[in-house]
Image (spheres, grey):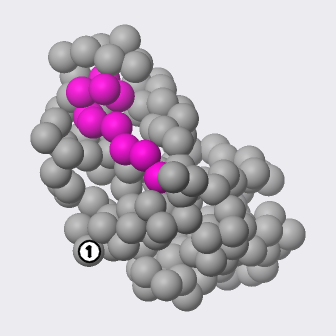
Amino acid sequence: MNAVYYQSPVGPLTLIEENGALTGVQFGRAPLPAGCRAAETPLLSRARRQLWEYFEGKRTEFDLPLAPAGTPFRRAVWAAMARIPYGQTATYGQLAAAVGSPRAARAVGGACHANPIAILLPCHRVVGSTGSLTGFAGGLPVKEQLLALEAAHSAP
């Protein structure tokens, strides 16, 4: 397991890879998990480059192998979240319906909160039922900044 820190426009990010796939993109300079070493790998270098392109408005989709650890329900939510188009949002209820559990909006919120791969699995695109911005691991100002970035670079 390897990790690098990336100073992004929304603050530091910790990128973690294991067995050839990204397993974490966390806000802040997170303490490294046991057995993890700070080391650049080709995958982590590629991830940093793609994040830089995203923040520059030059990338709307990521092309990286992801391996988020979680329950089958959470993995289903993250997969549905990954299908929210760049520059658009979906509600917790819409994601719940998309995974076949229309009454599980709160559980979807829990899956968003537990998302181990921020930005690439775009939990910032998930909003409340009225379109309001709700909890976000990076903080609501960062969520607002990410949505504004995408809106500024989305086709009309």
Q: Tell me what residue is drawn at x 48 percent, y 62 percent.
A: 150
- What is the magenta range? 87-96
Question: On the rendered structure, is 62 left or right of 8?
Answer: right
Height in image: 61 above or below 110? below
Question: What secondary structure is marked by label 1?
Answer: helix
Residue 21 seen in the current view: no
What residue is rendered at 26% in x and 74% in y? 141
Going by the numbered disc 1, the residue's amino acid type is Pro
Q: How many marks?
A: 1
Spot the residue most to the top.
100
Among the 4 quarters of the image, the one containing residue 134: bottom left
Residue 78: say if magenta: no
- Residue placed under numbered mark 1 in the picture: 141
Q: Is residue 43 left or right of residue 9?
A: right
Quadrant in the picture for residue 60: bottom right
> In the depicted view, which residue is nearer to us: 64 or 53?
53
Residue 2 shown left or right of residue 116 in the figure: right
Q: Nearer the viewer, residue 24 or 49?
A: 49
* Image height of 95 relative to 8, above or below: above
User: Residue, x 26% and y 34% (percent of image)?
Assistant: 92
Residue placed most toward the observer, 65 or 52: 52
Q: x, y percentage for residue 30?
A: 44, 77
Mark 1 surroundings within 10 Å by alpha-carbon count, few (fewer than 14), some (14 through 19), many (20 or more): few
Q: Is residue 60 visible?
A: yes
Residue 92 magenta-highlighted? yes
Tell me the quadrant of the picture where the N terminus can be found.
Answer: bottom right
Image location (x, y in percent) of residue 88: 43, 46
Q: Position of residue 58 (x, y in %)?
A: 69, 68
Q: Position of residue 12 (x, y in %)?
A: 48, 84
